[in-house]
Structures are given as structure tokens and as C-alpha cells.
Image (cartoon, rainbow, N blue to C red):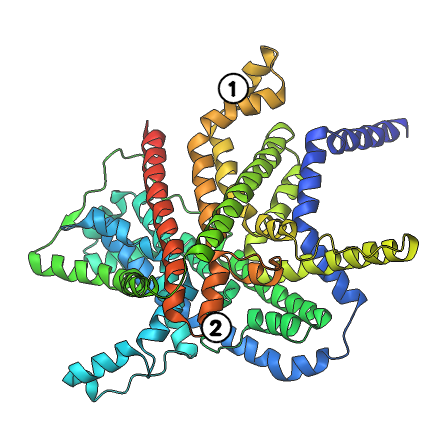
Amino acid sequence: MKKNEVSLNLSENSFIQNFFNRWVIFSFVITLFLSFPIFSLIFNVISNYSKDWGSVFNYEIYDYLFNSLSIIFFQSLLVVFFGVTSAWIISTYKFPFRNIIDLFLLLPLSIPPYIAAIAYGEIFDYSGDTYNFLKENTSILNSIDFPNIKSLPGVIFIFSITLYPYVYIISRAAFSEISNTYREIGKTLGLKEFNIFFKIFLPLAIFPIIGGVILSILESLNDFGTVQYYGVTTFTTGIYKTWVGLGDINSAAQIAILFLFFIFFILFLQRKFFSNERINLKSNSKKKNKLLRLNKFYNLALIIFCMTPVVLGFFIPFIFLLSNSIKALEIILLKDTLINTLNTVSLAFFVSLAIIFLSLIINYSNRIKNNKLNSFFSKTASLGYAIPGSIIAIGILIPFTYFDNFFVNFFKINLNLDVETFFSGSVFILCFAYMVRFFTISQTNIESSFYRISKNIDNNAMVLGKKPILILFNIHIPLMSLSILLSLILIFIEIIKELSATLILRPFNFNTLAIQVYEYASEEKIVESSIPSLIIVVLCIIGIIFISRINNLLFKSAKK
């Protein structure tokens, strides 16, 4: 009996010691902070069930589901076709301009889908100058009636040509890690290169490829600008219309929670069927993978295939923006654009720094106290990237609206003072949404960087009398500087492109470049929208170039 009591006391004491450690408390506070919008959303739906929910469910939800599922299915097929095939070609064959094309295949990431949608919407619009020019000057096209680009197939096309790089990057890395021994075994068995790809390499790389497809799906489900501009109803447009158009935050919250369950169901399927198995792709052989050479005809075919998604996803929209920007210089004043550029860059930079800081704290806490509690906090804090910005925005807006109403009524009743709202429509809640949404990007990179640093370094530093906080700032951060910079640039790019959360939470009379593009496009001022669109694209291109160079440096350092 006494032994049982002693063991129970020991387990209780160990739990108390684990939980009340200062680093664990830091992790708990950060996790609570980042998961607050989801808890508030669930609590609001439970406590304020709207009677109008039945009508929304009966009529519009089915449209949201049909359109979302159609986008997911066909977009997945196309991003796999472009991304996986291009990755296989780059990883397997040697042909002219291969290294340049490898970089070019990343460039569509610099074009947000809503900007590509505006460009193609104008190019293929029946009343557009480009469409009429092609009709008048090309005899073949004159007899062809192009389908309406502003439709569900048009949305799928835009997402496919701008989001395939998510699949390409992951597939390229997976194919590069597979040992050349597998190809040699396939040739020994009499398989041709085509069969080697489908029967050996594709099954080995299927799990990371599915991960890339899921990332592209999450990006498309988060999108608001493309589907709104093309008139396709999805969950994001439904949330925005219900809150901004009808002013019904309870119904918006109910649509958001249904959307959240839809996202979690997709993630559940991915984890259930595609995440349980792990395949060792590498062998002990130190031989480098040799690239295969082909004749000039096949080389030309490979170049054309790889450049097709690049031309569609980057060069056509970029040239459109460039030509329209020259026209726009004669129409608009650049003062507003410069102010919005400053707003966007400063907001993205400071939020990126804040996210990096929080990620360092929570990962370092997990390193010092590597227990189930800290691991749970780390995983919970990383849910944000899977959740669309519109859901996060509603989850933030609900509690802070209540706080504002409480403070305004308190000062009015007790002090007879008319005060403005503190939180709603402030930069703070916008930054909060960005931090929740993009924390996962930093978390993934910094977590892997900590794993690469031996714990013997920490032990030796502690023997020399260094405190944990000094070890973090004097040892770990310098060692992880490249990974931290990579995370900073990735977050910076994502914030610059973010539209859905910004549109709902932005302060009054405070615009970002994405908002300026959306407002001009909504008013059919396509030429005027080109300059802020071009600035977004150029900033993203610069970021992608830096990311490519940092990745090369990390790859070289990992080889040493």
C-alpha cells in the first residue's frame, strides 16, 4: 500500500515539475495564444446557434461542397501531372538549360492565384483587347469560341498553373534522395525508363507527393480572390458574404466551423492512408545518381514540356502585368501604392520576426523538456497553416468584438465616456491572424534545425555554466542562422500574398498591396491593379531567388 502511495506521489510530483517548468509554461502560453481563434469559434457555435443555419445548409452549403470538391479533385490531377512529371524529368535527364529551367519551375509561386486570375480574366474576356486582337489577326482562332474563363474550370486552371510548384519541390527532393541502385535493379529486370518511373520511383515517392498535393489543396481552399473574381461560390466566399455582406457573424461562424471540419477530414484521410508508412529511400552506396542523356529531339521535347507550366503560370501573367503597368503610370498616382507597399513590407517583416521568436521559444522548450506535454503543445500550435485565413479571421473577430463591446459599455455606463473600439479594426488582430496562420512554416524549419544540432553541445555549455537562454542566443541561433533566414523569407512571401484574412480584419483606411489589387479588380480597374500586382510579384521573385540560394547552401553544408 505504501509503495503504491509513494509511486503515485512520485508521478504527481514529476507531472507538477514538468508542467510548472518555466519553459513548459512558455510553450503553454504560446500554444494557447495561437489556438485561441479555433477555441473561440467552437465555443461561439455551441453557445450561439443560429436558427437561420437550416436555410444556409439546405441551399448554399451544397454549392460550396460541390465546387470545393471539384476544385480539389481536378486541381490534384493537374498539379500531379505538371509537378511530378517535371520533377522526374529534372531529376533524371541531362539536357540544355536544365539548371535554369529548374529555377524557372519555382517562379509561379511568385504569382498569387488571384493575380493570375485577373490577368487571364482580362486576356480571355470577350470584350478584352487581347481577345479581340487574337480574333482579328489570327484566322485559326477567329473560328474558335473559347470557353468562359470566369467559371469553375477557369478556377481549376488558375490553381493548377500557380500551385503545382508545391508538388514539384517535394517530388524533386524525393526523387533526388532515391538511390540510383533502384534504377539499376529495374534495368536488370528488363524494365524501360517509363516502367521504372511508374513501378519503382513513383511508389517510393508517393507519400511526400501526397503531402505536396495536400499543401496545394490547402492553398486553394484558403483562396478568396480567385473564386470571388470568377464568380465561383466556395466556403471562403460564403464566410465573407455572410459576415461583410449580411453582418451575421453567428452564421459566418457556423459556415466557418463546417469548413474547418471539412479541412480536418481531408487531413484525417491523408494521415490515415498516406502517413503511416515510412520508406527508406537511401542506400549505403556512395555513387552519385547519373543523369541520362537523350538525343536533340527528346531534349527539345523535355524543354517544351517543363516550360509549359512556367509559361502559363508565370511568364504570361508577368508580361501582362508589365505591359499594363506601363499604361497605368499615365493614369494613377503612385502615392497610395507606395504607402500600401510600406504597409505591406513593414507588416510582413515585423510579423515574420515575431513568428520566428515564438517558434524558437517553443522548439527550444521542447528541446530542454522533451516530454509528451511539450510535444502536444508543439503540434497544437502548428495547426494554423491547415486552417484557411477566413476561418482564423472569424475566430479572432468574435471574441475581440465581445471585448470591445464590454469596454465601450463599461466606460459609457460607469464613466459616461464615449470611447472607440480597442481591438476590432486594429493592426493587432491582423498581425494576430498572420501569426496563427503562418506559424507552422517557421515551426517546421526550426524544429528540423534543432534536431540537426547535437545535444552534447548543450551539455558542454551547461557544464561551463551557461544558462539555457544564453545557450539559445549564443550557440543555437548562430548555428541555425540559414534556416531562420529561410523561414523568415518564406513567411514574408506568404504574408505579402495573403488576402482572405486581411480583407476581413484590416483596419479602416489601412490597405496592403493585396487589398489594393482586390479593390481595383472588383471595380474592373484592371490596368490600375497592375502596378501593385507587379510589386507583389517582384518581391516574391526576390524572395524565391534567396530561398534557392539558401537551400543550396544548406544542401552543401549537409553533405560535409
The answer to whether residue 402 is above or below residue 555 is: below
Left or right relative to 329: residue 22: right
Asked if the residue at tag 1 contacts the one at tag 2, i.e. Cβ–Cβ closer than 8 Å, the answer is no
**Which residue is label 1 attached to?**
457
Q: Residue 99: x and y, percent? A: 21, 46
Left or right relative to 129: residue 272: right
Where is residue 255, by image quadrant?
A: bottom right
Query: Which is nearer the eye, 443 or 344?
Result: 344
The answer to whether residue 62 is above or below residue 361 is: below
Left or right relative to 230: residue 411: right
Q: Residue 77: tell me if it is visible.
A: no
Alpha carbon distance from label 2 to label 1: 56 Å
Where is residue 369, by image quadrant?
A: top right
**Which label's residue is closer to the chain start, 2 or 1?**
1
Quadrant of the rendering where the C terminus is positioned: top left
Q: Residue 72: x and y, percent? A: 46, 69
- Residue at the spot x=36%, y=57% of the render? 534
Determine the secondary structure under disc 2. helix
**Which residue is label 2 attached to?**
522
Determine the secondary structure under disc 1. helix
Q: How many marks?
A: 2
- Name the kind of residue labelled 2 in the image: Ser
- Name the kind of residue labelled 1 in the image: Ile
The answer to whether residue 59 is above or below residue 40 is: below
Kindly give the residue lying farthest to the top in the view shown: 464
Q: Residue 117: tell me if it is visible.
A: yes
Where is residue 376, by image quadrant?
A: top right
Query: Which is nearer the eye, 525 or 173?
Result: 525
- Residue at the spot x=34%, y=64% of the render? 328
- Residue at the spot x=56%, y=15% of the render? 461
